[in-house]
Amino acid sequence: MKVSILIPIYNADCYIERCLRSVFEQSYKDIEYVLIDDKSSDSSVSIIKKVINDYPNRFDCIKLYLNEINLGISKTRNKLLSYATGDYIYFVDSDDYIELNAVESFVSIVNETKACIIRSNYYECKNNCVTLKTNIIPINHDSYVEYAIKSVSSIDSLWKLFIKREIFVKNSLLFPSTINVCEDYIMTIKLFFYSKKIIDIESSFYYYTVDNERSITKKADVFNTDKIKSVLEVKRFLIDNHIYDKYKNALLYRMVMSKQNYLINKQYFNLDKYYKYFPEANSSWRLFNYGYRERILFWLAEYKLTFIIYLYYFIGKFK
């Protein structure tokens, strides 16, 4: 069984060596590595080439591509998929790393279970501390889709998944080219929907770095905008596949999450945007355990008591 490890790279010079050594030193041998640098402005490319030279036994199975212009993560992921030829896909982000037996372990489980997708637990790396994170395990296939739509327990993270490539190919799955945050949120929902067999395992192979300040998820304006766009994309997918009513409540949950900053975060406060996006979810804040301050704001917004909301903000009551 051939496995494709796909790594999108952008300004990762602080992390990329650790990442590459963890994938090149895998105990499993039948791996192809597809690396794409998305026009990094740091020393990532020179580090990549240096590390590759340390693994002559892997030369023939490493594909390194350099984007001539910065394309963004979604277009780069699509290029990675187009170059992949393995039976299974494993996405690894350039600021993260994996256990040296990760691929061998996944392959062994596939051989035993014939799973289309395997999802593992993971380690969170923050401030030089490593913490084991365990997943909530859905009870059935529909629950996987529902949890992914709601984005429960980071279920929508691609790097948790070992994925049969046939799912991408058979269903012509591509990342939306105009969305560069939450692109994995959209894709994971589609993967779960089309997958015939998903299993969770207790093992943890992946080390997820959460304190990379260069990450696009740290750019709040892009993050807030793309969260909205990602929900719209998912809504279209559900409607097109005639399952919107089935998962409507889950999507309402995500709608609130995607637009809440426009109401409850003073830094991004924009009442026009809050009213504009997903008005059908304006009463769904009750699904969350918000604090007293937030509950008041949501209630006022639900009944469009705009003047009172502005008054509360500008008299400094809500900071």
Image: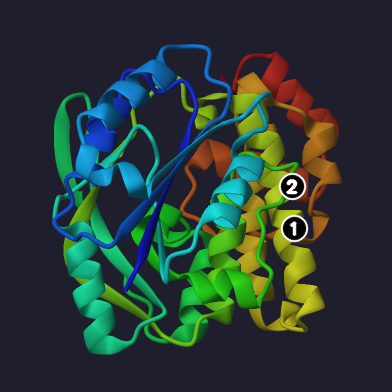
User: What label does residue 36 carry, if any?
Assistant: none
Disc 2 marks which amino acid? Lys
Q: Looking at this view, is 166 or 229 the one in front?
A: 166
Disc 1 marks which amino acid? Glu
Q: Which residue is mark 1?
A: 233
- State whether residue 135 appears in this view: no
Q: Looking at this view, is 96 or 55 the one in front?
A: 55
**Secondary-structure class at tag 2:** helix
Q: Is the N terminus in the top left, top right, bottom left or bottom right quadrant?
A: bottom left
- Which image quarter: residue 162? bottom left
Residue 293, percent from left and from top: 54, 36
Residue located at (38% from left, 35% from top): 94
**Secondary-structure class at tag 1:** helix
Q: Is the C terminus in the top left, top right, bottom left or bottom right quadrant?
A: top right
For residue 35, side relative to residue 257 (left or right) = left
Crowd rating for badge 1 (residues with CA inside 10 Å; few <14, some 14–19, many 20+):
some
Q: Looking at this view, is 224 or 49 the one in front?
A: 49
Q: Which residue is mark 2?
A: 229
- State whether residue 108 appears in this view: yes
